[in-house]
Image (cartoon, grey):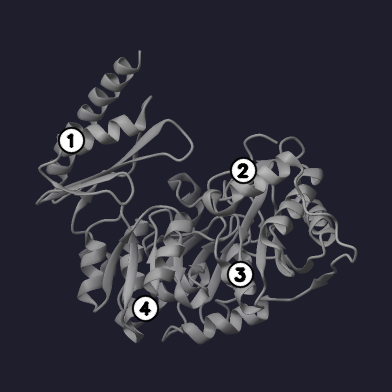
């Protein structure tokens, strides 16, 4: 039981930390916590998602809650169905990009508002651990089934339709991206890789953040005439891109490109995660939008989007959020936004990305430290002559370079992202900051002894 309740979801290894009995308890605890009358529940293609669904539904219906089963679906589709059906909440059974032995639950309130550790998961954990469930209902809820794909496809098509039917390659990693791709049919020509659903992930890990998982897609794009290539993670709430030459495009620059599509039809706030290149807010501003920096993590981003009524948000991890999908991810809308920009410009993706590469980034660098808060405090003091932003960790901005240091939610780590105007300056500043972080970590360790 211990350790499955995370900052943003519930995750464990099936048969050990996550069992049918635990799923039943989670269903009862969800109903006790939220008091829903009707929830939607979907699942990914892992072989144990079905038995976990049956147990979860048993727990929910036992508390008097009706369950609308979506069957196999992507996480963006489950968010859409939550809002579209005006449900009181939703649960998606998935472990996203984790290996096949893992599974879990992503939880939402009404209108696909996420339930995170601080907004409900901790309380659900407490209810499970203490057995503090509401009494079983005198009349059990019922399970019904709803085919949500057609409604989702219509919804996506109402939001965006590219000018031309481009040809793209798509790596589904044997995951739920095949559902997102249903919304691309008729608008794009999609050549598929690894489209057979298989929760054991026989071809490669379903994680487009890892460059090695994109190798098959890159080879396919290079072998034919494709506008670009896309790669989905296991539950398809993240998507990565390669250009027409098979070169990987950084996910923050894709945020800037998608913003251009969104801002074609309406103006307003667009959020970008604070690790993103400074070219992202510049492009948003140049296209008539209002760039708004946001902290890392989908629960924070979605809340900030709602607070600002933002049109769109992009995260460096490949999550792309749309107001039109209840302020949640839609990988289908992300792909179509890119196709829209490419089609309108009638130029290759690589040419559209080239002017966005205005700066040089270090990439995210992790460092083990015994006392992350002490290290962050030291950064704030040492670099006090820069412009300091404390939205998530410590961001320090100077004239031609900037960096962010933030603590991991789950491990004794700090994560560094740094960007500068030139490669030489980036390397120099990166090494300077890393040297300081090592020194601050040693100092904090000594003071704890």
Q: Secondary structure at mark 4?
A: helix
Q: Rounded to the nearest whole Å, what is the CA distance between mark 3 and mark 1?
A: 42 Å
> Pointer 3: residues within 10 angstroms few (<14), some, or many (20+)?
some
Q: Name the residue tied to disc 4.
A: 262
Residue 409, how many percent across, how many down? 45, 40
Q: Quadrant of the C terminus?
A: top left
Residue 330, how many percent across, how many down? 51, 69
Res 434 label: none
**Residue 416 vs residue 344, the one in the foreground:** 416
| Res. 343 image quadrant | bottom left
Q: Rounded to the nearest whole Å, what is the CA distance between mark 2 and mark 3?
A: 21 Å
Compared to residue 351, the image places residue 261 above or below, namely below
Compared to residue 406, the image places residue 400 above or below, namely below
Closer to the chain start, of discs 1 and 2, is 2
Q: Secondary structure at mark 1?
A: helix
Q: Secondary structure at mark 3?
A: helix
Q: Name the residue tied to disc 2.
A: 5
**Residue 157 vs residue 90, the one in the foreground:** 90
Compared to residue 181, the image places residue 133 above or below, namely above
Closer to the chain start, of discs 3 and 4, is 3
Q: Secondary structure at mark 2?
A: loop
Q: Are marks 1 and 4 in contact (CB under 8 Å)?
A: no
Q: Are marks 3 and 4 in contact (CB under 8 Å)?
A: no
Res 110 label: 3
Can residue 229 be seen here? The reply is yes
Closer to the chain start, of discs 2 and 4, is 2
Closer to the chain start, of discs 1 and 4, is 4
Q: Is 436 situated left or right of 204 in this image?
A: left
Compared to residue 429, the image places residue 353 above or below, namely below
The residue located at (79%, 73%) in the rendering is 145
């Amino acid at each position: 039981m211990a350790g499955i309740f995370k900052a943003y979801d519930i995750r464990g290894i099936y048969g050990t930390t996550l069992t049918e009995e635990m799923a039943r308890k989670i269903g009862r605890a969800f109903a006790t916590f939220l008091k829903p009358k009707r929830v939607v529940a979907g699942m990914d293609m892992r072989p144990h998602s079905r038995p976990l669904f049956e147990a979860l539904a048993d727990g929910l219906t036992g508390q008097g809650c009706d369950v609308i089963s979506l069957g196999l679906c992507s996480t963006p589709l489950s968010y859409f169905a939550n809002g579209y059906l005006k449900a009181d909440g939703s649960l998606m059974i998935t472990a996203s990009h984790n290996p096949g032995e893992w599974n879990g639950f992503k939880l939402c309130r009404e209108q696909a508002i996420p339930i995170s550790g601080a907004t409900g998961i901790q309380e659900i954990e407490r209810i499970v651990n203490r057995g503090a469930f509401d009494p079983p209902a005198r009349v059990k809820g019922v399970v019904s089934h709803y085919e949500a794909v057609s409604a989702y496809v219509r919804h996506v098509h109402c939001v965006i339709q590219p000018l031309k039917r481009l040809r793209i390659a798509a790596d589904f990693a044997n995951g739920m991206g095949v559902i997102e791709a249903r919304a691309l049919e008729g608008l794009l020509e999609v050549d598929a890789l690894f489209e057979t659903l298989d929760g054991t992930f026989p071809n490669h890990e379903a994680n487009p953040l890892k460059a090695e998982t994109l190798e098959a897609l890159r080879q396919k794009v290079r072998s034919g005439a494709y506008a670009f290539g896309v790669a989905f993670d296991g539950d398809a709430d993240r998507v990565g891109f390669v250009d027409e030459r098979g070169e990987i495009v950084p996910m923050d620059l894709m945020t800037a490109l998608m913003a251009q599509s969104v801002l074609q039809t309406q103006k307003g706030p667009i959020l970008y995660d604070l690790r993103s290149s400074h070219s992202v807010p510049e492009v948003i501003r140049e296209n008539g939008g209002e760039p708004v920096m946001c902290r890392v993590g989908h629960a924070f981003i979605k809340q900030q989007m709602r607070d600002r009524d933002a049109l769109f948000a992009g995260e460096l991890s490949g999550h792309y959020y749309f107001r039109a999908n209840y302020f949640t991810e839609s990988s289908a809308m992300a792909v179509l936004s890119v196709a829209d920009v490419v089609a309108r410009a009638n130029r290759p993706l690589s040419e559209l990305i080239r002017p966005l590469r205005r700066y040089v980034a270090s990439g995210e660098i992790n460092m083990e430290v015994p006392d992350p808060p002490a290290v962050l405090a030291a950064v704030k003091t040492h670099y006090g002559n820069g412009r300091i932003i404390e939205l998530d960790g410590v961001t320090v901005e100077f004239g031609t370079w900037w960096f962010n240091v933030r603590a991991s939610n789950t491990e004794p780590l700090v994560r560094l992202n740094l960007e500068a105007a030139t490669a030489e300056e980036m390397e120099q500043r990166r090494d300077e900051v890393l040297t300081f972080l090592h020194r601050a970590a040693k100092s904090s360790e000594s003071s704890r002894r």
